[in-house]
């Protein structure tokens, strides 16, 4: 029998993580927006958007990173490569993606471009990107002005709403990368003119060095200069070494310096005319401006095409350490692309379990987005607070302003970002969810990401994990332990790696983080937790991390539920590690007992506690505790109450026999509580069958599921809504003479609460739906065929919890699937994705989805946690 073809991409992964070859030295690590970030803000009042706007980005040097279109860089962002273009009509080159700043957008910051991640292998041995460029002038002013005029009650004005793509006339610009070796990268840029109009297109594949010399971080200035041959330049860097860029013959070679145009930005004379934005001047104002300049720190060959309708042009380049290649763009170049594309097909073929082409396309683009969203991220808080040596110091107010309590934070790594334009900075709980789909294709990278955030240069000395750069001290839900467990299990199931060393590494640091939660977020020491906003932005009637009306504090059902889930995650890890090391049995007991206390507090009603569970309405609510001892339930039916489903775990009795000390303690503790008439968490602890640990007793579970699967409440065509539809009738509460309220909003947020660009008052959010489905399967494992639920509520259609989880997965995946009319719910009412063959198979993985129609909302490329759809397809759809 013939041997099967080797999976070359898997071999490359093995070489990477064994240390034999650095396949991840180069990747899509270039940010898509460095301007308007906290890192680049040196203003006195912390006005991030105003200090470094898009209009400055082409002319002003960045301190902490770089950005570009379809770009790559080395893992320290020393040398960068990206695509610039010009349609002959715009006032500026298209060097970076345009979008609205937070204050400009009627729903916050928002990229206003059309681009798509089409493919990537985990080692980035092959990558493909599509950018759609306007043939007519790009509507910069219209996008700003129309959105500025719209209220929060109106939809956003998008690029496809303008006249820019009318008549189906535009450019499709594809950028592909294929690695011949770890430091030998073939680049192919292909441009098509679509529609019936002719056009002029300039393409500038741009190579440049990040400017570190101006900040005293690089003693020797790097340089790019022409070599002896006409179509090659040498890029020399004192630390990175030499790279050579080979390219097809262009019309001209453009060189300048990656230096700030001080005259334009600050009104002070430039020491040299060769500044960062010189290419704009050379193409748009003065063709001869850069003539004769043969070196610099920024370089681009300029290709200009006059295109007729339907025409296609191609540019070949190669970035490599190899000097003096005789035919760099010839046969070996062509073969490299052919092989890498075939190998990518082989690698992703392992996930196909059927012949559904549409599902395969959805899953592969989801993976591509996950992998393209890796980014070089750098911030050193002491250096950011106090300034670089030899440069003007930041304003003194910074020493007591944003993030000044995080002086130990020093990040310089490749990190999975939520979105490289809208959120080009990490978010702790986003990253935890990213690691699930990432573990499917590269478990080692997922494990490294999880370990990274527990390292001392991320975690605060007090044990808190950094949330995000706008406020590292904000509190994200504690899902890190959950993610560590999932990645461990996936790696074991898929790859046969029982990596308990990884579990031990994260367990020790998670203990510190758990202790921080217990010490800092349990106001009364009663195991009911406050938590703060917990990433759910505007889900409450007021800002849950700010001043609480009436001077009280908020006992949060979701904060408590997250902590119960955290306990069970740590318990499960301890039990796994306890199989080989008896020392972990003691700490397993600790987390079991702590979970019991939390479950009792959330469910119980006592003299000094009203309880989160409402027995009449059958739901868990936040409780506002006022100084006078009064407890006011915030009766909002939302994800706040549904998070209580997440804390569930089945204990395998056979495995417990290997942990006798823990099992003895568990039985003793349960009998002790029973004898003292305290709340029982385990309903049945006989000596047969497995044991269910759940925050929600069975009778309350059934009532929650009744609401969960009710299409008049939470269940929508695209998954579980973040707030019940019953709140179409506004919920209003009076606290200390003030009225606060909440209305079901299935789409964009109509309030500015917590920034106003994310809405948790009705839309469908993929990560929370994923956790709900995960919990349903855990309950199903225990109850099996004995427990059935009506799905949807009122339909008289009864199914098991496993089947309910599958049905929920199908609804989530259906957001992206083409229906019988050729339309995908994710694209809303846009006919272009249905009628234009060059849009038909393109997907966007939005931040969240409309609670009624399932069309995409928020950050359009937040492939991060929405990339979970790839795992849902793998688990439920084939």
Image: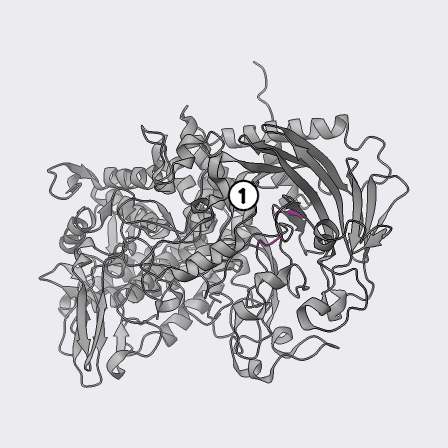
Q: Nearer the viewer, residue 550 or 496?
A: 550
List x then y, in percent, for residue 532.
35, 71
List x then y, in percent, for residue 755.
40, 66
Residue 748: image quadrant is bottom left
Q: Is residue 136 left or right of residue 219?
A: left
Q: Which residue lies furthest to the top in this view?
A: 1
Q: Which of 605 and 81 is in front in this view?
A: 81
Which residues, given as a range, are shown in magenta? 25-32
Q: Is residue 229 visible?
A: yes
User: Where the C terminus falls, by quadrant?
Assistant: top left
Quick check: is 26 in the magenta stretch?
A: yes
User: Where the N terminus falls, by quadrant?
Assistant: top right
Quick check: is 370 in the magenta stretch?
A: no
Q: Helix, strand, or loop for circle 1? A: loop
Is residue 216 positioned above or below 841 on the image? Answer: below
Is residue 320 positioned above or below 613 on the image? Answer: above
Q: Which of 456 and 62 is in front in this view?
A: 62
List x then y, in percent, for residue 158.
44, 50
Q: Can residue 582 be seen in this view?
A: no
Q: Is residue 7 left or right of residue 292?
A: left
Q: Mark 1 points at which residue?
A: 442
Q: Tag 1: Cα neighbours inside 10 Å, few (<14), some, or many (≥20)? A: some
List x then y, in percent, for residue 18.
65, 44
Q: Which residue is drawn at 60% across and 37% down?
A: 174
Is residue 850 positioned above or below 313 on the image? Answer: below
Q: Is residue 90 left or right of residue 428?
A: right
Q: Which of 524 and 104 is in front in this view?
A: 104
Report the magenta stretch's main SS. Answer: loop
Q: Is residue 813 left or right of residue 421?
A: left
Q: Which residue lies furthest to the right in this view?
A: 228
Q: Which residue is drawn at 79% across and 52% down?
A: 255
């Amino acid at each position: 029998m013939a041997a099967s073809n080797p999976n070359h991409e898997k071999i490359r992964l093995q070489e990477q993580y064994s240390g034999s070859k650095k396949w991840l030295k180069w990747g899509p690590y270039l940010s898509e927006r460095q301007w308007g970030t906290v890192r680049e803000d040196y203003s006195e009042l912390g006005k991030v958007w105003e200090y470094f706007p898009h209009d400055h980005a082409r002319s002003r040097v960045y301190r902490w990173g770089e950005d570009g279109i379809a770009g790559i860089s080395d893992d320290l962002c020393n040398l960068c490569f990206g695509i610039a273009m010009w349609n002959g009509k715009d006032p500026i080159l298209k060097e970076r993606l345009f979008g609205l700043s937070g204050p400009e957008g009627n729903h916050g910051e928002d990229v206003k471009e059309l681009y798509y991640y089409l493919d990537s292998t985990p080692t980035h041995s092959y990558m493909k990107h599509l950018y759609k460029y306007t043939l007519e002038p790009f509507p910069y002013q219209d996008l700003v002005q129309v959105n500025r005029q719209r209220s929060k009650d109106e939809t956003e004005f998008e690029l496809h709403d303008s006249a820019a793509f009318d008549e189906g006339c535009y450019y499709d610009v594809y950028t592909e990368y294929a690695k011949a070796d770890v430091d030998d990268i073939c680049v192919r840029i292909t441009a098509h003119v679509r529609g019936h109009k002719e056009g002029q297109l300039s393409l500038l594949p741009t190579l440049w060095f990040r400017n570190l010399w101006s900040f005293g971080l690089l003693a020797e200035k790097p340089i790019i200069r022409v070599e002896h041959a006409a179509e090659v330049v040498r890029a020399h860097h004192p630390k990175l070494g030499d790279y050579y860029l080979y390219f097809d013959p262009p019309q001209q070679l453009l060189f300048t310096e990656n230096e700030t145009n001080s005259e334009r930005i600050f009104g002070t004379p430039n020491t040299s005319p060769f500044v960062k934005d010189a290419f704009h001047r050379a193409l748009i104002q003065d063709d001869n401006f850069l003539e004769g300049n043969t070196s610099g720190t920024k370089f681009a060959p300029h290709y200009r095409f006059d295109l007729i309708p339907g025409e296609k042009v191609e540019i070949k380049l190669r970035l490599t350490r190899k000097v003096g290649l005789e035919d760099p763009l010839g046969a070996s170049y062509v073969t490299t692309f052919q092989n890498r594309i075939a190998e990518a097909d082989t690698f992703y073929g392992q996930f196909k379990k059927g012949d559904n082409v549409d599902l395969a396309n959805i899953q592969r683009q989801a993976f591509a987005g996950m992998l393209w969203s890796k980014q070089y991220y750098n911030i050193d808080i002491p250096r950011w607070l106090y300034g670089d040596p030899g440069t003007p110091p930041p304003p003194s107010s910074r020493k007591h302003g944003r993030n000044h309590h995080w002086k130990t934070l020093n990040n310089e790594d490749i990190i999975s970002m939520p979105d490289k334009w809208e959120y080009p900075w990490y978010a702790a709980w986003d990253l935890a969810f990213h690691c699930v789909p990432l573990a499917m294709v590269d478990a080692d990278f997922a494990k490294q990401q999880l370990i990274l955030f527990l390292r001392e240069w991320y975690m605060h000395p007090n044990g808190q994990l950094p949330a995000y750069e706008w406020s590292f001290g904000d509190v994200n839900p504690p899902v890190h332990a959950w993610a560590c467990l999932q990645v461990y299990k996936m790696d074991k199931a898929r790859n046969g790696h029982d990596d308990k060393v990884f579990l031990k590494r994260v367990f020790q640091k998670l203990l510190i983080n758990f202790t921080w939660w217990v010490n800092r977020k349990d106001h009364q020491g009663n195991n009911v937790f406050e938590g703060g906003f917990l990433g759910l932005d505007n889900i409450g009637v007021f800002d849950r991390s700010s001043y609480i009306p009436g001077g009280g504090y908020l006992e949060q059902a979701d904060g408590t539920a997250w902590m119960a889930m955290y306990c069970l995650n740590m318990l499960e890890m301890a039990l796994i590690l306890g199989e080989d090391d008896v020392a972990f049995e003691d700490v397993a007991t600790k987390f079991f007992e702590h979970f019991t206390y939390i479950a009792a507090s959330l469910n119980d009603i006592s003299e000094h506690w009203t309880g989160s569970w409402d027995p009449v309405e059958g739901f868990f609510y936040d409780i506002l505790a006022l100084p006078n001892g009064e407890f006011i339930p915030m009766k909002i039916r939302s994800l706040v109450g549904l998070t209580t489903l997440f804390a569930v775990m089945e204990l395998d009795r056979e495995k417990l026999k290997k942990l006798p000390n823990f099992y003895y303690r568990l039985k003793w503790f349960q009998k002790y509580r029973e004898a003292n008439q305290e709340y029982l968490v385990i309903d049945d602890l006989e000596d047969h069958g497995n044991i269910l640990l759940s925050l929600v007793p069975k009778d309350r579970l059934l009532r929650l599921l009744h609401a969960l699967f009710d299409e008049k409440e939470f269940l929508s065509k695209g998954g579980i809504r973040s707030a019940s539809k019953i709140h179409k009738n506004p919920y209003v509460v009076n606290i200390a003479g003030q009225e606060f309220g909440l209305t079901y909003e299935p789409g964009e947020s109509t309030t500015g609460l917590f920034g106003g660009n994310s809405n948790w008052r009705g839309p469908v959010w993929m990560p929370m739906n994923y956790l709900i489905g995960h919990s349903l399967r855990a309950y199903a494992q225990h109850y099996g065929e004995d427990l059935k639920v009506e799905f949807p509520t009122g339909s008289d259609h009864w199914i098991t919890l496993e089947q309910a989880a599958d049905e929920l997965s199908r609804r989530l995946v259906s957001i992206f699937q083409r229906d019988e009319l050729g339309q995908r719910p994710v694209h809303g009412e846009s006919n272009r994705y249905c009628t234009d063959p060059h849009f038909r198979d393109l997907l966007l993985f939005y931040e969240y989805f409309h609670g009624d129609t399932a069309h995409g909302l928020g950050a359009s490329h937040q492939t991060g946690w929405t990339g979970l759809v790839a795992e849902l397809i793998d688990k439920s759809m084939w």
